[in-house]
Image (spheres, grey):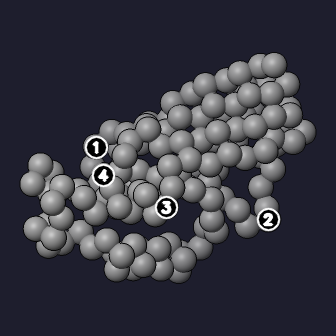
Amino acid sequence: MKTYRKELWFETRQRRELINITGTVAECLRESGIREGLLLCNAMHITASVFINDDEPGLHHDFEVWLEGLAPEKPYSRYRHNGYEDNADAHLKRTIMGRELVVAVTDGKLDLGPWEQIFYGEFDGKRRKRVLVKIIGE
């Protein structure tokens, strides 16, 4: 069995952003040379997420509105955690959107559904953060 590991680094311009990383993850798979196996992709920071969904701007807006309704950024005084930082909402948003994903690798390709795309979700941005891609297989 072969293994592959790569860290992807992101620095967003806004506090919250969704970035389609499907192409970058597919490039990692090409680099690995693995044709059959599993690909794990996970956010290495507690205020960021990796998830699969549709790349449609209306849906991205809906995510923002929905997440902000569940865990609003302000007032900062709403959260006990914010005695140390001002990002409690980002921790909660990450929990909702998820830490990682696993995608089957079939015939050297990501085995995704027709509209599925891989996203990096940033909820406390404007600083450098990383995502781990780990692939195992043959």
- Which of pointers 3 and 4 lies earlier in the amino acid sequence? 3
- Which residue corresponds to mark 4? 125
Assign a secondary structure to mark 1. Answer: loop
Q: Provide residue 21's location: percent of width, then percent of height.
A: 57, 49
The structure residue drawn at horizontal position 47% and vertical position 79%, both measured from the top left corner, is: 62
Q: Which is closer to the viewer, label 3 or label 2?
A: 3
In the image, taking residue 40 as reference, residue 8 lies left or right, namely: left
The structure residue drawn at horizontal position 50% and vertical position 49%, both measured from the top left corner, is: 99
- Which of pointers 4 and 2 lies earlier in the amino acid sequence? 2
- Spatial separation of the CA atoms under disc 1 and disc 2: 33 Å
Three-letter amino acid code at the position of disc 4: Gly
Three-letter amino acid code at the position of disc 1: Arg
Residue 127 badge: 1
Three-letter amino acid code at the position of disc 2: Pro
Three-letter amino acid code at the position of disc 3: Met
Q: Which is closer to the viewer, label 3 or label 1?
A: 3
- Spatial separation of the CA atoms under disc 4 and disc 2: 30 Å
Which quarter of the picture shows residue 44? top left
- Spatial separation of the CA atoms under disc 3 and disc 1: 20 Å
In the image, taking residue 111 as reference, residue 130 lies left or right, namely: left
- Spatial separation of the CA atoms under disc 4 and disc 1: 5 Å
- Spatial separation of the CA atoms under disc 3 and disc 2: 21 Å
Q: Which is closer to the viewer, label 3 or label 4?
A: 3
User: Residue 111, relative to residue 72: is it above or below?
Assistant: above
